[in-house]
Amino acid sequence: MVATGTSHGPARPVLQHVRQVRPQVSHQPLNAAVNGLRPEERDVVALRYFLDLGEDETAAALGIPRGTVKSRLARALVKLQERVE
């Protein structure tokens, strides 16, 4: 189980939280969509949403500017929405 502490609060098991909120939803389409992203987009999505890092933490982990994190996330989220709908 993945747990991480952030500046937004104490560590929490991210995947367990997702399963509690929507246990009936299959994650397979989302996983396939995320795996289909370009590696640099997949990295920011994984750090931001799966590991629950903030934008600054994601930028530091990847060694890129915060603005690059934001633009990659924006592109990735558009692609994910198109692929999952």
Image (cartoon, rainbow, N blue to C red):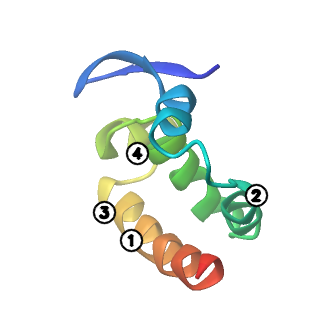
Work out how far the residue at label 2 is from the one at label 1, CA to CA, in angstroms. 25 Å
The amino acid type found where label 1 is placed reads Ser
**Residue that carries the numbered disc 3 in the rendered image:** 67
Q: Nearer the viewer, mark 2 or mark 1?
A: 2
Question: Is 27 in front, or is 31?
Answer: 27
The amino acid type found where label 2 is placed reads Gln
**Does the residue at mark 2 contact the one at mark 1 (Cβ under 8 Å)?**
no
Question: Is 83 in front, or is 68?
Answer: 83
Q: Earlier in the sequence, mark 4 or mark 2?
A: 2
Q: Based on the displayed image, in which of its 4 quarters is residue 60 positioned?
A: top left
Question: Is 37 in front, or is 63?
Answer: 37
Above or below 22: residue 53: above
Work out how far the residue at label 4 is from the one at label 3, CA to CA, in angstroms. 9 Å
- Disc 3 element: helix
Q: Nearer the viewer, mark 4 or mark 2?
A: 2
**Residue that carries the numbered disc 2 in the rendered image:** 28
The picture places residue 78, in percent across and down from the top left corner, at 48, 80
Above or below 14: residue 18: below
Q: Is residue 57 left or right of residue 26?
A: left
**Does the residue at mark 3 contact the one at mark 2 (Cβ under 8 Å)?**
no
**Does the residue at mark 1 contact the one at mark 3 (Cβ under 8 Å)?**
yes
**Residue that carries the numbered disc 1 in the rendered image:** 71
Quadrant (top left/top right/bottom left/bottom right) for the C terminus: bottom right
Quadrant (top left/top right/bottom left/bottom right) for the N terminus: top right
**Does the residue at mark 4 contact the one at mark 1 (Cβ under 8 Å)?**
no
